[in-house]
Image: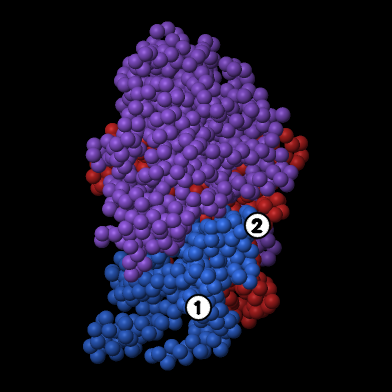
Amino acid sequence: MFRRILALLLVLVMVALFTASCGQSSKPQSAEPLVWGMHTDIETLNPIFTESANEANILNAIFSTLIKVNDELEFEPYLLEEMPVVSQDGLTYQFKLREGIKFHDGVELTAEDVKFTYEMKMAEKNAVPSRLRWERIANFEIIDKYTFYITLKEPDITWLEGWAYAESMIVPKHILEAEFIQGGNELSKGGNFSRKPIGSGPYRFVEWKANEFVMLEAFTDYFRGKPQIEKIVFKVVPDLNTMLARFSIGEIDIYDRAAPDHYRQLLKLQEDGMPIEVHNFPSFMSMNAIFNMRLPVFQDRAVRQALNYAFPKERFIDVVLDGVATVAHADTPPMSWAYNPNLKEYEHNPEKAVQLLREAGWKLGEDGVFAKNGVRLSFTINTNTGNPVREAFQEIAKQEWEAIGAEVFIQNYEAATLFGDILRNLKFDMIVLGSAAGIDPDSKTLWHSSQRPELYGTGQNFAGFSNQRIDELLEAGLKETSQEARVAIYHEVQQILSQEVPYLFICFFNSITAVPANLENFRPNPTLAGNAWNIFEWKLN
Amino acid sequence: MKSGLLNDFMRAFQKNRQATFAAAILLGIIFFAIFAPVFATHNPTYIRLAQEQIQLPPTALHLLGTDNLGRDIWSRMLFGARISLLVGFLTMLITIIFGVAYGAVSGYYGGKLDFMMMRFVDISLSLPTIFLVIILASFFKPDFFGIAVIIGLTSWMRTARLVRGQFLSLKEEEFVTAARALGYSDCRIIFVHILPNVRALIIVNATLLVAQAVLLESALSFLGFGVQPPQFSWGSMLSASQQIIFLEEAPWTAFFPGLAIFITVLCLNFFGEGLRDAWDPKLKNIAS
Amino acid sequence: MANRFLRRFATLLLSLLVISLLSFTLIELSPGGAMARYVENPKMSEADRARIAERFGLDKPAPVRYFIWLRNTLQGDLGISFMTGRPVLTEILERLPATLKLMTVSFFISIIVAIPIGIYSATHRHSLADNLASACSFLGLSLPSFWFGLLLIYLFSIWLGWLPAGGMITPWFDPAAYPLLIRPFVIFWEHTRYLLMPAIVLSLSNISSWSRYMRSSLLDVISQNYIRTARANGVPERKVVYKYALRNALTPLVTLMGLDLPVFFAGAVVTEQIFAWPGMGRLFISAAGNRDYQVLMGITMITAVLVLLGNLLADLLYSILNPRVTYEG
């Protein structure tokens, strides 16, 4: 009987082994590919529907945009022969495409495809994430195979920039139109093209194994020459710690947008002799705490400034973000051409904070909390749950501000409630958020008095900021066409912002990317274009 | 009644050394948790925002080192114990109260009612409870009491089954017939006459439930769905430390909270098993 | 017997109905409701949101939506995922094999390890091995799986570098690159090395509880009258244990295994997260984070179906192994 049991166990072992071995094996590959680690799986490879930064990276390889924004924040024509010509009144743009650009199936890319892309973005039934920039188009006119005009409803200097990003990538009309019509004049986000895209970019699509990887191979007829790197794999690794671990053993080659606390570890790997290069550069992403200036307690500028003085921004960046950020004094990132390096700075000085409050007439009550005219220095900080950096901010702020005589509560909500209700309906006292600036320094929607949501239902002036000079400046900035004049305008805007501090401007995040040392032409790009913007010119030595 | 219970415990301890040892450790942990302010060396939430203060290894000043925000780990362990244990006990209470009542009613009345009630238990048992717990916890982001309720809502079934089984057999006993003859109300019979005979089963079950609840709460917190800051438990300490575990620099930040969970659950299990061993070995097969 | 299974099946259907109602209600009650995900994006205009609401049928009242969903489900359409726009069923079926693979291997490991340990412990009661096994079982049941997983990763991936830290397979693995003779071993090892740690972590608690249950069940049976009779009749000890006792001892274990099926899924959620295993558990967690309620309900329902089918199977096995035992309603 014992022998029978043994035999049975042996059978079970065999079954287990068999089960372990089965499952699809992936396509055989000959050369070892370049592996880029992604933090989450993508949702679609159709630029019409794209929303995420991860997708942008892959789409940069598969598709093309009309123009590109390079790492020095300059525009370059890409699919276009030259940068578009703008009419005097700022309404009409003339575009001319290069000739001989092919899609991966050999068909040439023409103005028809660009117009089709626009039509797909505007098609009513398509669940496009945002139509904002497309709705500004009044008229799209095709002149010939490679030339077309676009007329806007109103002049908008910031409009051109959008053509450089993933949402404006050109899709093939000859393939997608059929799918559109078949779907009853509707494209589905999960449709065929989303899973098997055809573009005009340097890499053609090979395979997408859901939640695992996307594999691409070089496109021979790419209009700027076949890329040197034969195969690229975008691999999904949802946990950043696992990503770091796999990067350190060479399973992942490119670790993009690393977690701030991995920076030191990456540097250490480099020191220990691993042949990598760690890029650390400022980005356009920032983190801020918004004061709700409609509340009595935040209407006093002394309070806002005092709270700025009492928060240790430098140390916060040093410890919580591992030094991988830059202190912010206003809303414009250091990389922008409009950045004003001479702003009012708030170094950590709790005594000065208390002094400011006293000078403004605040008195310390018996409960240890400042008060003035019946208003106590008491408020709640809100943010979304599940974000350790923001939560750390709250806990540090509470500790520091209570030490100078404030009363601070912490109340967090999950993202949907926070953005949908608390922010939108202005139910917060102070809210901690992240944001991404555009290349153009215009910030009317944030600071102009007409952009307070409670007035007309539009705008993102959540702080409730209202300053006549700012209004004047912002309006002038949008009308002005000379770069020099605009620099002066926005310098002054930032100056006022750093004085009035409608936000506690915390920091601009740095972007950390680690790549193999022998990867040539990798040039990190702080804009929404992402670091794969010039994937067509990468080379491995 | 009380002295009877105490005698039971004494008997258990004498028989089983492991249970005694485990109980001692448990009492120690509870003692430290209750008197956390006394034993803590620092303020558990005090952040030291300086590179020289964060992720320090265990030293004389910081017994278990500091975490990624410079907070003293030893003090955090003590206060975190409060939440972890509290959630565990609360969950157990909710589960026991509901499960026992349910099982008692079902077992005592029997027949069709019992049939229906047990069918509901069957259905509930086949629920993929972890999914429901995560959905509830992620949507409502509850405080520790809410978490206890959520976990409790998904744990009462086995208790109900056990108690029902006991009631089914016990209600045929003579003392029950006698009580009925004397005209006592059903409610009184259930709670005053039958229930005390089931107390051994319940206590064993309760102990094991606490263990289960502590594990589940820490798993939830680890995944990010459990207690939210500024509250913290051992599980969320582990979650926060997850980022640094791969730092060969500071593995202790993850090691100690996990160890604490492990030891607590281990002792609870030993204790529960020891009780079961001592009181009625026949319970072995059905009390889990 | 047919009657019994008919009843069981009816209970199964009822269970599924209750579960579906419960899941649906939960999601309705969640903050933000079904539109939650799109509310976050400030770039979307009101019109965009309305469009998406209509597309996913979110503008109808709750009970109507429930019945629409129920009807669709019965036809095999579990809706469309918010996150990817693909059918939920496709998303789940893509990941189901990975989870099943992990669970199956884990299941077999558990059986292969637990049963012999249990038998040995029972037959060599109170020996050193028995006590050791008992102690280890306690350890296994008390060890938090996520902590154990992290420790294993630290030990075997970071420190020793023997095993990969996560994932299921190397995308560029090419079996053709190896000579024919050793190819099967290479293929086997390639799959196994990713599977090893997650399967061990997942099996741990089951090995612990099953081995102890096996032991106590066997001990119980051995003390029965008919076993003593067999012994008295001179039947060799070995035959007594393995031929008579074991068979009867296995039956309650089978029931326990059936009851423990949900535990596998629960464990899989945590394990898949730690080891980046591309299964349903991980999909569930990301869906919970993204409030993709179609996916959440889909996974809950499919898991419930699998668990209930598993229980049915356990029942079947139980009655085969022990036809004499009457089924207790």
Instruction: Name the spot of residue C136 as percent of width and height, x first.
Output: 62, 70
Labels 2 and 1 share a subunit: yes
The reply to whether residue A193 is in sight is no
Q: Is residue A459 above or below residue A405?
A: above
Horizontally, is C218 left or right of B232 in the view? Answer: right
Determine the residue positioned at 50% across, 37% down.
A341
Chain B: colour as depicted: blue
**Which callout, 2 or 1, points at the residue further toward the start of the chain?**
1
The residue furthest top is A144
Identity of the amino acid at label 2?
A: Glu
Name the residue that disc number 2 marks: B249
Q: Which chain is purple?
A: A
Q: Is residue B19 above or below residue A287?
A: below
Q: Which image quarter is the N terminus of chain C in?
A: bottom left
Instruction: Name the spot of residue C5 as percent of width and height, x first.
Output: 40, 57
Instruction: Name the spot of residue A44 as percent of width and height, x first.
Output: 46, 33
C329 or B195, which lies in front? B195
Instruction: Name the spot of residue C178 as percent of width and height, x first.
Output: 74, 36
